[in-house]
Image (cartoon, helix red, strand yellow):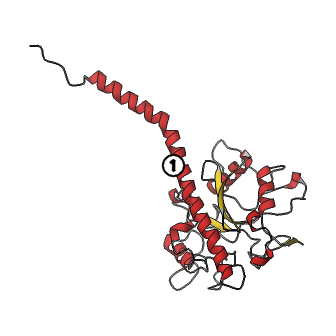
Amino acid sequence: MRKIQTAFTLIELLIVVAIIALLLTILAPALQNAKKQASGVLCMANQKALATGWVLYSDENKGNLVNAHTLRSSTFEHGVYWVEPPQTEDGIYTGESPAPEDELRGIRRGLLYPYIKNVKGYRCPSDERKYLQTKGGYRSYSMTGGLNGEPWGDYTPFYKISSIKFPENYINFVEEADPRSWNMGSWQIDPDVNTAPSTWSWVDPLAPWHNEKSTLGFCDGHAKVHEWQDDRTIDWCYQQFYGVQPGETAVSNVQPNNPDIYFMKSQFPYQELR
């Protein structure tokens, strides 16, 4: 009786391997996009928790807004900011490119930590800075400067939550990849929408970690994923952190008629222009 062949020949095995490799090549971008979308959901949950904690802090502190600034100075005060700067166990500022534990210590000693008692909630799962060994940056989120932030620009910030008449329209948390290693200060932009569009510019970069989108938190406690419309926004933000790569042309922060700048101007919180 003739034997039935059950094993693959070498050629058949090579064909199968080639087909599997081809399928993986085709599916890899889709899987990567799905992973980024999933991380966007987790990031939005982080933003919502922070935005809600921000509201709860104000409710329990006579309507006062938590300080949105994060001072980079050896003379900073403890118990003043929403998160404190990176520091040693003794509370000494450790400067740029801090050790991760120094930055985590600053988060735990911040005024919002009692409301979000999980350091993972301060970091986006897609924050790409973890792959770079020369720069730090654990915390992915920054507060907007118009909410009791650092003294900056020609506007008067909010200091009381009762002064914010339409909280659903104002951003309190953004994703930022500060090129100085950790997210210093508060996130800033010139909020005057009536300046000449030819002069519109960015001040601080964003972090488009989610397929050229970013999560945003709002003063009423909700959060959303926002898609950026202008390629200049994406290019400038990446170049701020990664630098200009070989073959690239540097992108200016002055970007006339950029709809993304207009969006962030119109959603930036402040009481009045000076």
- The residue shown at (86%, 62%) is 192
Going by the numbered disc 1, the residue's amino acid type is Lys
Count the marks: how many? 1
* Observer able to see residue 181: no
Q: Residue furthest top?
A: 1
- The residue shown at (65%, 74%) is 54
Viewer-side residue, 222 vs 141: 222
Write down the residue under mark 1. 35
**Residue 168: x percent and y percent?**
74, 64
Quadrant in which residue 19 is drawn: top left
| Quarter occupied by the N terminus | top left
Viewer-side residue, 245 vs 191: 191
* Observer able to see residue 3: yes
- The residue shown at (56%, 50%) is 37
In the image: residue 260, left or right of residue 13: right
How would you rate the neighbour count of disc 1 (Cα within 10 Å): few for under 14, some for 14-19, many for 20 or more? few
Q: Is residue 40 above or below residue 123?
A: above
In the image: residue 134, left or right of residue 67: left
Viewer-side residue, 165 vs 106: 165
Quadrant in which residue 64 is drawn: bottom right
**Residue 246: x percent and y percent?**
63, 44
| Quarter occupied by the C terminus | bottom right
**Residue 247: x percent and y percent?**
65, 41
**Residue 129: x percent and y percent?**
55, 59
- The residue shown at (52%, 77%) is 105
The residue tagged with tag 1: helix, strand or loop?
A: helix
Viewer-side residue, 18 vs 135: 18
Quadrant in which residue 263 is drawn: bottom right
